[in-house]
Amino acid sequence: MSAFSDAYAGRNDFNFVKTWKTVGIVAVVLVVMSIGLLLTRGLNLSIDFEGGSIWEVPSKTLTVDQARKVMDGIGENLGEKYQEATTSDGTRVLRVSGRVKSIEQSQEVAKKLAEAAGLERTDIAVTTVGPSWGKDITRTARNSLIMFFVVIAIYIGLRLEPKMAASALIGVVHDILLTLGFYALFQFEVSPATMVSFLTILGFSLYDTIVVDDRILDNTTKYGRTGKYTYTTLVRRSLNEVLVRSINTTFVTLVPIVVMLVLGNIVFGEKVLGDFSLALLVGLALGAYSSLFIATPLTAFFKEREERWVEIRTRIEARGGDANDTSWAALHEDAEPQKQKSTMPRPAATVAPSAPPLTTNIGGHPPRPRKKRR
């Protein structure tokens, strides 16, 4: 608990710099693994991207095996996904999705499923999406991402610094690749709701990164002119100052998302809520992590190679200091003399000797005589 109390009181000095190398190696490995998963396993795209139909059968007796036999009897590999869910009114629904060649084939599947479940054909809800619709969604999502990156890069470059903008965008790419790798590994379905979540993830990740960068700029303005501190030292100070805020913001944001995932997807079987909340849960956690351990270290890496900060590092070493010592204690040197002064015992009071009566004025001239009263 002392660590948390120190963090809330502003006395924390976690050595983020010490972890940067290890975290960087792990990040590179995870990114390479994610790219490999995307190339080998691929993403499990919903019918909104590739076209197909979804049949929802409200039945308490129809099992997944029975539905699979019906689909196999109509066409080979026609039924691809089977999901059991419960609606808000307690009705069990078996959701079957697959690719069909025509509307007539989709209606035939609905008829066979209704017969197997002992229902009327009109009891089966059918949703059919053509392949052109999926292409439009893919193109729109791609264009949205490109525009997002362009606008954000311009804004951060003008509002903060170009190198901060580059680091922030690299952190966002890291978050997207790891999220896609997570989906490829577990073969979770990627739907339009997932794409909306991706855009939300990008916004949150950049928001957290900009907060850190803004604090770095403040500390650079305040301490950078003294020539006592390297850029990495100021970055470490800034990370410690915003650490509690980042933890609180992430925790408060993830709590309703977890509730939405559990209640919406698992309890009530709302697929759209499930797709949306799952992507948010993974992406927001990665966004908070990357803002502290990916984007910020990259900013320090780029800035330490500027002439100004190279000169400061050289000057510190010339004075006999350790330029690699980024501890926070160096930033409180001004407060140490006051602290020592308050703890030292005060010397005994001495009584000054009484001064002789004033006979001469300052400068050695005799006092002016008083005038006689009349």
Image (cartoon, grey):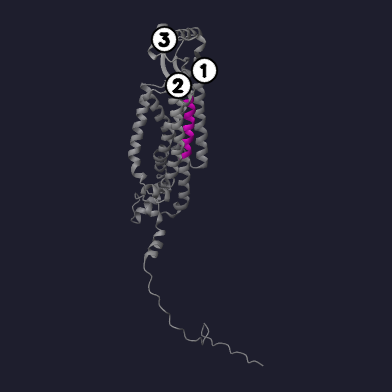
Nearer to us in this view, 83 or 164: 83
Mark 1 element type: helix
Residue type indicated by callout 3: Met
Report the mark closest to the observer, 3 or 2: 2
Residue type indicated by callout 1: Trp
Mark earlier in primary sequence (3, 2): 3
Q: Which residue is mark 3?
A: 71
Q: Identify the residue at horizontal 42%, vertical 18% (top origin).
A: 83
Q: Is residue 29 above or below residue 18?
A: above
The reply to whether residue 168 is in sight is yes
Question: Callout 1 environment at 10 Å: few (<14), some (14 to 19), or many (20+)?
Answer: some
Separation (CA) of disc 3 from disc 2: 22 Å
Q: Identify the residue at horizontal 38%, vertical 27% (top origin).
A: 182
Cβ–Cβ under 8 Å for marks 3 and 1: no
Separation (CA) of disc 1 from disc 2: 28 Å
Q: Is residue 180 above or below residue 207?
A: above
Mark earlier in primary sequence (3, 1): 3
Residue 76 occupies which quadrant of the picture? top left
The location of residue 29, given as percent across then percent down, is: 33, 32
> Does the magenta portion include 194?
yes
Mark earlier in primary sequence (1, 2): 2
Q: Which span of residues is magenta-colored?
A: 193-208
Q: Identify the residue at horizontal 35%, vertical 56% (top origin).
A: 319
Query: Can you tell which mark lies on residue 133?
Result: 1
Query: Can you tell which mark lies on residue 86?
Result: 2
Report the mark closest to the observer, 3 or 1: 3
The location of residue 324, given as percent across then percent down, is: 34, 49
Separation (CA) of disc 3 from disc 1: 24 Å
Q: Main secondary structure of the magenta part?
A: helix
Query: Can you tell which mark lies on residue 239?
Result: none
